[in-house]
Amino acid sequence: MTGRDAEVLWLLPLTEYGEISKETLWNSLEYFLKTVVPEAEKIGMKLALHPNNPQVESIRGISRILNTVENFDRVLNIVPSESNGINFCQGNFSLMGSDIPALIRRWGKAGKIHFCTQQIKLILYDNDNTKISHQYQKIAILHLSFAR
């Protein structure tokens, strides 16, 4: 999501569900994980939660809880299991102000990074090697994904 898209979100009204608190989301996520992780274990499936994007506290009244490293640690501790893990989106974790290499070492060593994504933006230039102005610039995004 671009910064421009995020700006538009603040102009939109609440969703039909009204405001949803962080506590409600944590309770729902805990119920989900306690129900699904044991079933995933039975078939050897690895679950990988992706961080919220953009990194904001709420959108249209719906709180966001997957937006800090501490919250991901909390998720991993709800149901400690080899099946409960992370989609390590380096872009989103870097927006959290995280030390990416340290997180990769910590969560990687613990076997918690089940999927990894990285976006690389390629800025296009015109024929005379001049960067195309922002207004007309087309950015190609190469989305690299790695499964463990």
Image: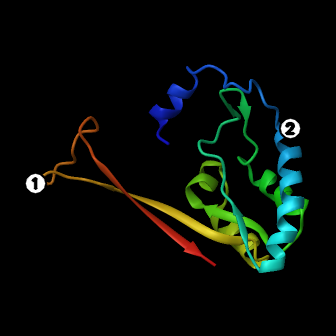
At label 1, the amino acid type is Asn
In this picture, is 38 found above or below 56?
A: below
Quadrant where the C terminus lies?
A: bottom right
Residue 24 — which label?
2
Binning the other alpha carbons within 10 Å of mark 1 as few (below 14), some (14 to 19) or many (20 upward) gives: few
Q: Which is more N-terminal, label 1 or label 2?
A: 2
Residue drawn at (89%, 68%) of the image: 80
Circle 1 SS class: loop
Where does label 1 land, which residue? 127
Q: Position of residue 114 (x, y in %)?
A: 68, 72
Q: Position of residue 96 (x, y in %)?
A: 66, 49
Task: Give left or right: position of 146 versus 43.
Answer: left
Image quarter for residue 84? bottom right
Image quarter for residue 23? top right
Between circles 2 and 1, the one closer to the viewer is 2
Q: Nearer the viewer, residue 109 or 59?
A: 59
Image quarter for residue 73? bottom right
Residue drawn at (86%, 55%) of the image: 74
Circle 2 SS class: helix
At label 2, the amino acid type is Thr
Q: Nearer the viewer, residue 81 or 125?
A: 81
Q: Nearer the viewer, residue 58 or 28?
A: 28
Q: Position of residue 145 (x, y in %)?
A: 52, 69
Residue 86 — which label?
none
